[in-house]
Image (cartoon, rainbow, N blue to C red):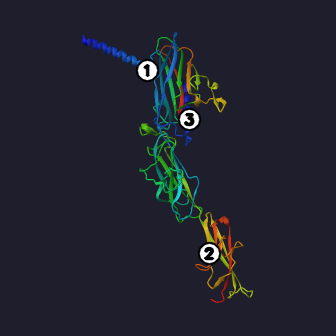
């Protein structure tokens, strides 16, 4: 009898520990559910066999307060000075009753390179609804106002929460900035086992679960800057075999374009005006040694006369991996100014 | 005269009241059966020493183990034989394997409430294949006490189940 009790208690403690290791446990039986137990006994006295029932013991399922915040799946790439950059979190009610949650954003996170600047409003709640907009930050989502529209989640329910921040202009390529989202049960938080008498769903007690009824997780912005440089050089060839810039001499220009950084220079365009007193030599425009026709056509280069004479080359989405882009063209020095 | 009749009526009502109360408790016979539910409560004192005590389970949260105790007290002057306690695993709860206990009893389990057998004999057919039943699939527990229950003696059956 005594040994049973000890082993029973030990296994109860062991269960609690094992349970504590797993935060993402399903909500379980709904708060307020009554659980009844009645035993029966059959016995014989002399030759008479009888049956009896026990009292009915009733246990009411109390509300467990548990919450989980899931961070964004990946870093959000940003450029310096951009506004309205979004981190998507998910808040799950892991409890067994409906519960409202307070949401708090924090941008002053240690261990990162910069603090994102909170936009106004800085927190939005996904309205879900149509599958097309569920989980996607768009105009249907509503600003979060603490105490006014705290998300009230049913057991096992969840909501997507968007943190919206602006990126400082001073950040450098490769910098990381973090923001955290904290969700806490409105009924209360505390160490696992904390009881809020009578404050649970359906009038039961609310008991804090292993998540302490509070969870916090962080999302990251990664600055992907890119610097594009163009270096121009020239070679003069005069009509007498020399290198003097005489009227009638030809100037061969070479422009080397490089992108440096982890970002992408989207739809980069190179344009260079034909210097005054010179005339573009038709058919001399090339990129990386490949000729480009002068017309505005399918290839990426063109010679234009308006608003002024110039060459123009579309470089597309330029990254460091694109490598050096070499553009060449030639002009003749005019005989008359 | 009128007063006397009234007293008799009152006495008759009292008898009826007692009878119905006994009925409610489950046919007052030789064995008084009592069921209780308890949970383990860990208390840490000022010195940080943890003690675990059992307290009545009134409100429990999912994942918590409840210890159910059924006690059979022989209130007659004669011994009771073939004392057999039956208890269904409560709804929304899962029996904790190996937790059923009852001094001097043979314990068997049932998946359907009809056929009772030792755990090793309980099987479940899953996708056409027989496999051993898992403890959380046991739905009924039966304690058959060997020997007789002496007058005034109490037989205790106990098991644990976790709230789903």
- Residue placed most toward the observer, A226 or B115: B115
On the question of residue A180 being in view, the answer is: yes
Residue, disc 3 = A15
Evaluate whether label 1 is on the same chain as label 3.
no
**Measured along the vertical axis of the image, is residue A196 above or below residue A151?**
above
- Image quadrant in which the C terminus of chain A is located: bottom right
- Image quadrant in which the N terminus of chain A is located: top right
Relative side of B12 to B162, left or right: left
On the question of residue B101 being in view, the answer is: no
Image mark 2: chain: A
Indicate the secondary structure of the residue bearing disc 3: helix
Residue, disc 2 = A271
Residue, disc 1 = B25
Residue drawn where x is 67% and y is 66% of the image: A322
Which of discs 3 and 2 lies nearer the camera? The answer is 2
Q: Are marks 1 and 3 in contact (CB under 8 Å)?
A: no
Query: How many neighbours does mark 1 have within 10 angstroms: few (below 14), some (14-19), or many (20 or more)?
Result: some
Please state the horizontal and vertical placement of residue A171, each as a whole percent of the image: 55, 64
């Amino acid at each position: 009898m005594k040994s049973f009790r000890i082993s029973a208690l030990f296994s109860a403690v062991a269960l609690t520990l094992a349970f504590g290791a797993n935060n993402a446990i399903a909500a379980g039986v709904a708060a307020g559910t009554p659980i009844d137990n009645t035993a029966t006994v059959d016995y014989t006295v002399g030759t008479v066999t009888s049956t009896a029932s026990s009292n009915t013991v009733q246990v009411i399922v109390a509300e467990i307060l548990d919450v989980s915040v899931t961070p964004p799946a990946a870093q959000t790439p940003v450029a310096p000075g951009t506004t309205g950059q979004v981190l998507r979190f998910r808040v799950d009610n892991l409890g067994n009753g409906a519960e409202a949650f307070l949401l708090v954003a924090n941008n002053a996170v240690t261990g990162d390179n910069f603090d994102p600047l909170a936009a106004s409003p800085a927190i939005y709640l996904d309205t879900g609804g149509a599958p097309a907009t569920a989980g996607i930050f768009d105009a249907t989502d509503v600003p979060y106002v603490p105490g006014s529209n705290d998300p009230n989640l049913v057991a096992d329910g969840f909501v997507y929460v968007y943190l919206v921040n602006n990126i400082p202009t001073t950040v450098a390529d490769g910098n990381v900035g973090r923001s955290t989202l904290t969700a806490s049960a409105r009924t209360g938080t505390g160490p696992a086992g904390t009881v809020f008498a009578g404050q649970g769903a359906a009038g039961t007690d609310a008991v804090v679960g292993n998540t302490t009824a509070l969870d916090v997780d962080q999302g990251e912005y990664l600055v992907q800057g890119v610097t594009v440089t163009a270096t121009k050089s020239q070679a003069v060839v005069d009509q007498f075999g020399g290198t003097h810039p005489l009227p009638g001499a030809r100037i061969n220009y070479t422009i080397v374009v490089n992108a440096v950084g982890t970002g992408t220079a989207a739809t980069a365009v190179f344009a260079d005006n034909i210097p005054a007193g010179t005339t573009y030599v038709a058919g001399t425009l090339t990129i990386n040694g490949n000729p480009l026709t002068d017309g505005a056509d399918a290839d990426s280069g063109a010679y234009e006369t308006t608003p002024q004479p110039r060459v123009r080359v579309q470089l597309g989405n330029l990254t460091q991996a694109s490598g050096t882009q070499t553009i060449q063209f030639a002009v003749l020095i005019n005989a008359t100014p | 005269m009128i007063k006397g009749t009234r007293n008799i009526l009152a006495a008759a009502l009292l008898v009826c009241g007692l009878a119905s109360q006994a009925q409610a408790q489950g046919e007052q016979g030789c064995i008084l059966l009592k069921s209780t539910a308890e949970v383990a409560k860990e208390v840490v004192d000022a010195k940080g020493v943890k003690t675990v005590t059992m307290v009545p389970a009134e409100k429990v949260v999912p994942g918590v183990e409840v210890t159910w105790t059924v006690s059979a007290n022989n209130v007659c002057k004669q011994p009771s034989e073939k004392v057999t306690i039956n208890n269904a695993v409560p709804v929304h709860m899962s029996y904790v394997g190996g937790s059923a206990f009852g001094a001097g009893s043979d314990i068997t389990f049932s998946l359907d409430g009809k056929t009772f057998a030792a755990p090793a004999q309980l099987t479940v057919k899953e996708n056409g294949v027989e496999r051993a039943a898992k403890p959380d699939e046991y739905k009924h527990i039966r304690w058959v006490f060997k020997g007789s229950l002496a007058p005034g003696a109490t037989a205790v059956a106990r098991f644990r189940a976790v709230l789903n």
